[in-house]
Image (cartoon, rainbow, N blue to C red):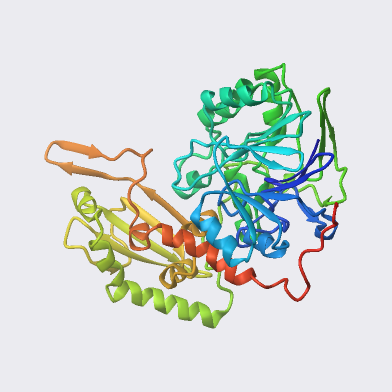
Amino acid sequence: MKTTLIGHACILFESRETTLLSDPCLFSLHFEELNYYFPSVEINRNKFPRPDAVYLSHRHQDHFDIHTLAYLPKDLKILCPDDPLILECLKELEYTDVTVVKDFEAIQVKNLTLIPTPSLTQDYYPEHGLIIQDGEVNVWNQVDTIVSPEIIKYIHRICGQVDFAHVRFEPLLEQNFIYNKDSVLPFDEYSSFLKVAGTLSPKFAVPGSAGEHFYDRAEFLNHFVFPATQEQFIKDLEAFSPEIRSSTFYPGDVAEISSEGAKIHSQQTDLVTRQEDDIFRTAFNPLYEVPRIRTLTEDPEQRTIEKEAVIRFIEDGVFLNKLTQSEVMAAYQHWGIGYRLELFDEDNSDIWSIDFSKDPAFQKGYFGTVNLYEGIGYSEFYRLIQGETNWDFVGASGQYRTFHNIYRVDRGNFESYPQEKKFPQPLTEVFPRNREMDREKYLKDVRRWKGLFVEAGPAKMIDNN
């Protein structure tokens, strides 16, 4: 069997008879043009073989890429979790052969046996890893899943010793940056990746997923979000479990796997062309300069329209009315929160404040107490009002930042709220992160990309048959 890394989580698995494309993302720039494959690559889409099946592990936009799914032929066999949103999008895109997969239930695709493995993530939608068997070797792709020793024991029961594994290696720190927490290697999470690999004890392991970086105006986040490297993980894995053979695995690399072992062939595919080695521009450095938030809207007239709409939303009382109706209002008043909201234009910012120790009312400017701060670009506040964006993008793009220093003083008593815990944010109360917002971000992409490739015909893929 061969596995070829296209980029990030997109992998082509090839046996003698069967081709499987997993988490297809055939456009380097993805996730609303926020992320790109790292290291930089050019994907040669017209050279791809037609896969016998396409596997979708879960709905995250770096794994469930609507742009690519709009591009691919609609008669491909799709395997996906029982996620109503994924199924709705595939139906809208007019896929005709969709099979729902379940934990540890085997699916046969020609000579490949595919067995989805479960995840212990706390999200309300399912996600899976995947065992791939061709009768000679067993490969496990962990993808983003969180697994327990019991899950690994069950994998051993199915496979014996896994011949080759794509394992997690990179903790992601977007939330740390957004919430003003330390951008440092989270030891518990990072060590858990080593423990999973060690408990699985495959014959050969490579780092999996987490092969993307932020693009353009969000590029500075690369210095704060990715605290580990493939080389670092491989070195640590060699010390942690010396019996496991391992290697880095970058876009364009091919793993040739047999019962005798695995060989990594660097840059041995014409499907992916490696571009510049941009590690020097993106190395982890939490002391890097942080640029101020700026509106993403470039047209001056549109910036004015957006700014006026946001100011009306605040000064006409819509924001505060929605906030006072939320369940967290009592908490704001209990702590006597001094709230500061800062809105960023291209070259300046505006501030409004609320003193929740009194009858709450917005006032322009600020007062001395700042217990809770939120900063956001005018463009993204406007798009939240219009229902045109979502918190995944707003947060991941660096367009929103917050901190809290929450305490209250009574006679002879000082009470504080733990810094390590999140505190309810006014903006997420007014614009709640809910399932409808989640659904709309995908359907927006469906509307954007559906039919775009109709005139050019279906994706040009080489027919293996």
Classify 302 as above or below 186. below
Residue farthest toward the bottom in the current orientation of the protein: 301
Q: Position of residue 261 (x, y in %)?
A: 82, 24
**Residue at 23% over, 50% down:** 331
Q: Position of residue 69 (x, y in %)?
A: 67, 60
Q: Position of residue 240 (x, y in %)?
A: 65, 19
The answer to whether residue 267 shows anywhere in this view is yes
The answer to whether residue 6 shows anywhere in this view is no
User: How many badges with numbers are in the image?
Assistant: 0
**Residue at 64% over, 70% down:** 450
Residue farthest toward the left in the current orientation of the protein: 411
Classify 159 as above or below 360. above
Which quadrant, please, contains the N terminus?
top right
Determine whether, in the image, residue 282 is placed left or right of residue 436.
Answer: right
- Would you identify the image quadrant in which residue 112 lies? top right
Classify 236 as above or below 71. above
- Would you identify the image quadrant in which residue 198 lies? top right
**Residue at 57% over, 30% down:** 190
Classify 111 as above or below 434. above
- Front position in the image: 326 or 165: 165
Q: Position of residue 146 (x, y in %)?
A: 53, 34
Determine whether, in the image, residue 319 is placed left or right of residue 17.
Answer: left
- Front position in the image: 108 or 415: 108
Determine whether, in the image, residue 267 is placed left or right of residue 438.
Answer: right
- Front position in the image: 185 or 239: 239
- Front position in the image: 425 or 224: 425
